[in-house]
Image (spheres, helix red, strand yellow):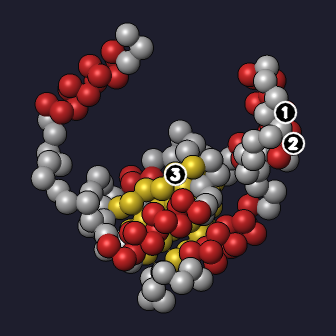
């Protein structure tokens, strides 16, 4: 079966599981919006563990409408007090214009992908600032919630504040 190796690993994981019984609050009061990139380990990069934070991931680490819903739920019901918007160096979403990303998907699938908005990022720092503003200015995000934007360097592991 296609998932046997992963299910076997899950058995090992569950045998030593110690996170049972927690509620769904973010114990460290943190939410992080970040990219789906496999080089990013969102909890460990800021010294947290399961149970501590809400992690919201998508291509590029963008504050989409659905991410805003999650942030609103986090800050109103799940004890999130600080929101980090974390994009990263060498991100595929910031590597090419939208049309080129669409062309790459089209080539990979043999099916036209030009109808799908992929969300290419042309100016990463400007995008982060705009995304931070989207969170800060949202009418359902209280004024005392701290919001900041960062670029994560996938080669050094360091976060650089940008907004
Ligand atoms: Zn990325």
Viewer-proximal residue among 69 and 74: 69
Q: Residue furthest top?
A: 1
Left or right: where 62 falls relative to 26:
right
Image vertical order of residue 140 relative to residue 104, above or below: below
Q: How many residues crowd mark 1 within 10 Å: few (<14), some (14–19), many (20+)?
A: some
Image vertical order of residue 63 relative to residue 15, above or below: below
| Residue 93 image position (x, y, % from top left) | 72, 47
Left or right: where 94 falls relative to 46:
right
Quadrant including the C terminus:
bottom right
Q: How many residues crowd mark 3 within 10 Å: few (<14), some (14–19), many (20+)?
A: some
Kindly state the secondary structure of the residue where label 2 is placed: helix
Q: Which residue corresponds to mark 3?
A: 57
Q: Which residue corresponds to mark 2?
A: 99
Q: Which residue corresponds to mark 1?
A: 103
Q: CA distance from mark 1 to mark 2?
A: 6 Å
Image vertical order of residue 155 relative to residue 84, above or below: above
| Residue 126 image position (x, y, % from top left) | 75, 69
State whether residue 104 appears in this view: no
* Residue at the spot 76% in from the left edge and 30% down from the top edge: 105
Q: CA distance from mark 1 to mark 3?
A: 24 Å
| Residue 31 image position (x, y, % from top left) | 43, 65
Tag 1 and tag 2, C-beta contact below 8 Å: yes
State whether residue 93 appears in this view: yes
């Amino acid at each position: 079966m296609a998932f046997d190796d992963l299910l076997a690993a899950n058995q090992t994981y569950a045998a030593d599981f110690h996170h049972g019984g927690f509620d769904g609050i973010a114990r460290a009061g943190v939410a992080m919006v970040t990219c789906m990139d496999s080089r990013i380990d969102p909890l460990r990069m800021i010294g947290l563990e399961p149970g501590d934070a809400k992690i919201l991931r998508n291509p590029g680490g963008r504050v989409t409408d659905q991410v805003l819903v999650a942030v609103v739920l986090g800050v109103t019901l799940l004890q999130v007090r600080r929101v980090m918007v974390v994009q990263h160096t060498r991100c595929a979403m910031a590597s090419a214009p939208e049309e080129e990303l669409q062309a790459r998907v089209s080539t990979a699938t043999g099916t036209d992908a030009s109808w799908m908005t992929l969300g290419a990022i042309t100016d990463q720092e400007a995008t982060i600032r705009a995304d931070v503003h989207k969170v800060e200015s949202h009418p359902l995000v209280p004024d005392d919630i701290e919001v900041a934007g960062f670029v994560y360097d996938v080669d050094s592991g360091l976060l650089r504040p940008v907004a």
